[in-house]
Image (cartoon, rainbow, N blue to C red):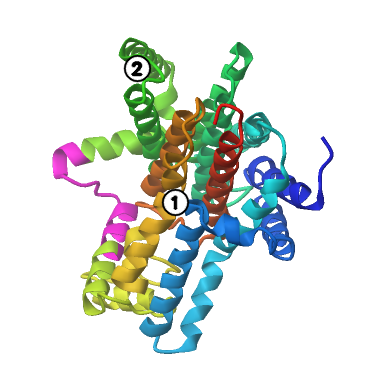
Amino acid sequence: MPYSVRSSAVLLALVATLAMSPVAPEAGNVIFLALGGLSVALMFRRAGAQFRRPIVWMPVLGLGLIALSYGIGAKSFEGLIGLAFFAPVFAIWPLLTAAEDMKSDDSSGLIAVLALAGVAGAAVVAVLEVVATGTVRAGGGVANPIHFADVALVVGFVACAGLVGKVTLWRFLFLLGPVLATIAVVLSGTRGAVVAVAAMLAVAAIGLVVLRLVSVKKALIALAVLVVGGAVALLLGASQFSGIQRVLIDIGQVLQHGVPTDESTAIRLQMISGGIKAFLQAPIFGHGPLAFVNLANELAGVPFGSWPHLHNDLADFAASAGIVGLVAYALFLLAPIVEAARALNTEAKPRILVLATTLVFGFFVMGLTNAMFGILTVTVSYAVICVVTGILVSQADRSPEA
């Protein structure tokens, strides 16, 4: 089909975030933000209609609450500088407005192909790094290994968008997305992302059963296959990979001591403790985006040093923006789920709802051990979750079945 300027901008934004970001995040981020800015100039005729969608007004309201808290918490307009941390969120509205020019009845296959290409690239990069250097934290050549794993995991599950439309046998190949993402995550040695893999699979399985997309019998068979496959992988040496080792060690320490005892976990616990104390000092609006980390460090039982954030989204939002910030955080996370839930009743709706819920829950779980909002690469991943969900819902609502 011919592409307009608007639809071309959205297509390129999807290429940048799905196919490029897992292996070239800097370039993908720049292209995404540039196209989001371009789309602002193209959105005005249809912006009002788009604003009524939860996938638009909920993030916009969240940004407004963040601006309010940062301004009051910092006691200065300088606090508004912190909105720059949420730059990718500003691109959701204009890109979804531009996406209305995508007249294709089903873009799910295109989205899935781009995502599968991106996560395959991440898996290849991770394998090559391990083979070539013997590293226990693959992804360092692309980005911080944690951010590398987070982006690979989000993009890998976005590949399951290929199952939203009419499901044919070949489309089950898109289930390779989570498999390739798991390879990249395990080789990165990122414990939070390893836990998120399990959490996302559980949420997806529960959603599929509850919405009757698969039977309980098939879900139990799939679970048995995963358990047996995992056991075989451990017997064949998968436990030698750093990500698996660190999770197994953590499980043993939790059983013995209640919490992991390694230095990294200890620092994170001190950050959360300091963040809670900082929150209690200014529970409504927080301390603004510029001072909350230093204050949390001063209030922590054991100072944790100089860091750009508290390695926990809940602690970051609470300490920097208070209760108002936590409300904004909830609006951000719930927007894709609410958008999918309010879609017209079509065959695609429950599939979109399962996909959106799985992606959001994974994003939340990863945010418990590392900041997701405020880190450009992974904040872009949140924006692409919203854009993909919005496109899938919009096209499902326009289908003859609706």
Under tag 1, what secondary structure?
Answer: helix
Q: Say which of 118 and 95 sits in front.
A: 95
Q: Quadrant of the N terminus?
A: top right
Q: Nearer the viewer, mark 2 or mark 1?
A: 1
Q: Is residue 229 left or right of residue 185?
A: left
- Residue at coordinates 78% horizontally, 47% vertically from top-left? 8
Say whether disc 2 or disc 1 marks the residue closer to the N-terminus.
Answer: 2
Q: Is residue 203 above or below residue 363?
A: above
Which residue type carries mark 1?
Ala
Mostly what secondary structure, the magenta segment? helix
Q: Is residue 354 above or below residue 270?
A: above
Q: Where residue 223 is drawn, which disc sits there?
A: 2
Q: Position of residue 117 (x, y in %)?
A: 67, 32
Q: Say which of 329 and 46 sits in front.
A: 46
Q: Position of residue 214 (x, y in %)?
A: 39, 17
- Residue at coordinates 55% horizontally, 34% vertically from top-left? 156
- Residue at coordinates 15% horizontally, 44% vertically from top-left? 257
| Residue 176 highlighted magenta (yes or no) | no
Q: Is residue 121 above or below residue 378?
A: above
Q: Residue 93: in sight, yes or no?
A: yes
Q: CA distance from mark 2 to mark 1?
A: 30 Å
- Circle 1 packing at 10 Å, graded few (<14), some (14-19), many (20+), is many
Q: Quadrant of the C terminus?
A: top right
Which residue type carries mark 2?
Leu
Under tag 2, what secondary structure?
Answer: helix
Q: Residue 312: in sight, yes or no?
A: no
Q: Position of residue 209 (x, y in %)?
A: 34, 22
Q: Which residues are magenta?
A: 254-271
Q: Where residue 274 is drawn, which disc sits there?
A: none
Q: Where residue 335 is drawn, which disc sits there?
A: 1
Q: Say which of 66 and 157 sits in front.
A: 66
